[in-house]
């Protein structure tokens, strides 16, 4: 099944990193003016600010704060580094609670000095250590599986199946998954795993952008929806069929788009959003 067309912007959320050069205040104003209804805040945009006041300010722009990005980076061959990661994730919980964000997106991490299995075990242990504090604060944790090209240093969780396994093993309603089309579109088991994720109540977030060919930078060459080869509409259909009714979060890291006029880029995001 393919999704029905998007008729309005009521589910459109944008990650602040997408319009990288804009401050949090500027993003809030311009997103509101463009009709955007949700915002996911990257932590660097909160630096030097009163976080609670920043949250109120965004809500006054009619924006729901969908998520705080990002926590994670749990694995390391060095125990002290793993402990530091736990402390940073506890701090992220405080920030999310102050901001009024429902969840933290976890880029789980990996260390090329050890096996992916060991890194995954450390990720699960790390999430389980942070979890009681997150529950107390009312903040959910969303595991984001990353494309396998990032398995060396960014995440040892590379498929939705692995993320489902981990979320189910932890077994808390405060731990779920952020499904990003950029990382998952190639997976032959995607439809099945999205269904499983929804059926277990673990589908917390849905991120969109596109995969451009040729990709010239592993990190900062994501495309605007429609510029690449990801069947976004089909995947959105699976996600909605699995019971997801949250925001469609536009998350684009792109040197090319960041170098363009950001107001024009925002207009293009809105128009391409309606066709995906
Ligand atoms: Zn994402």
Image (spheres, rainbow, N blue to C red):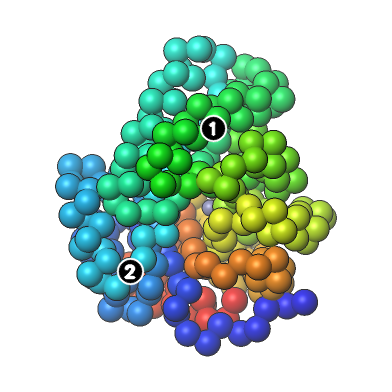
Q: From the image, tell me which residue sits under label 2.
A: 63
Q: Nearer the viewer, residue 34 or 55?
A: 55
User: How far from the left and from the top, in percent, is residue 59?
Assistant: 27, 66
Q: CA distance from mark 2 to mark 1?
A: 28 Å
Mark 2 or mark 1: whose residue is earlier in sequence: 2
Tag 2's secondary structure? loop
Q: Nearer the viewer, residue 121 or 114?
A: 121
Q: Nearer the viewer, residue 175 or 50?
A: 175
Marks 2 & 1, CB-CB < 8 Å contact: no
Instruction: Decide: few, some or many residues near mark 2? Use Cα within 10 Å; few <14, some 14-19, many ≥20.
Output: many
Q: Is the residue at mark 1 in contact range of ligand 1, meaning its CB lies under 8 Å from it?
A: no
- Dividing the picture into quarters, in which one does residue 40 lie? bottom left
User: How far from the left and from the top, in percent, is residue 172?
Assistant: 59, 42
Q: From the image, tell me which residue sits under label 1.
A: 127
In this picture, is 263 found above or below 17? below
Q: Is residue 124 left or right of residue 71?
A: right
| Residue 179 seen in the current view | no
Q: Which quadrant: the C terminus?
A: bottom right
């Amino acid at each position: 099944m393919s999704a029905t067309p998007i008729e309005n912007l009521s589910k459109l959320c944008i990650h602040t990193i997408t319009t990288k050069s804009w401050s949090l205040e500027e993003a809030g104003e311009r997103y509101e003016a463009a009709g955007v209804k949700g915002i996911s805040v990257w932590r660097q945009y909160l630096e030097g600010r009163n976080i609670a006041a920043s949250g109120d300010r965004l809500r006054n722009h009619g924006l729901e704060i969908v998520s705080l990005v990002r926590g994670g980076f749990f694995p390391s061959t060095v125990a002290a580094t793993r402990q530091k990661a736990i402390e940073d994730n506890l701090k992220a919980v405080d920030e999310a609670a102050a901001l009024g964000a429902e969840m933290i997106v976890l880029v789980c991490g990996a260390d090329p000095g050890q096996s992916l299995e060991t890194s995954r075990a450390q990720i699960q242990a790390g999430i389980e250590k942070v979890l009681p504090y997150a529950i107390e604060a009312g903040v959910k944790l969303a595991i984001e599986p990353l494309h396998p090209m990032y398995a060396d240093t960014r995440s040892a969780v590379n498929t939705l199946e692995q993320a489902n396994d981990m979320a189910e093993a932890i077994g808390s309603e405060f731990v779920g998954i952020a499904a990003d089309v950029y990382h998952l579109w190639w997976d032959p088991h995607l439809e099945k795993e999205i269904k499983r994720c929804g059926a277990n109540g673990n589908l917390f977030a849905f991120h969109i952008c596109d995969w451009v060919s040729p990709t010239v930078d592993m990190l900062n060459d994501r495309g605007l929806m429609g510029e690449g080869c990801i069947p976004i509409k089909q995947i959105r259909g699976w996600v909605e069929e699995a019971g997801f009714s949250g925001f469609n979060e536009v998350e684009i890291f792109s040197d090319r788009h960041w170098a363009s006029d950001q107001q024009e880029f925002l207009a293009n995001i809105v128009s391409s959003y309606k066709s995906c």
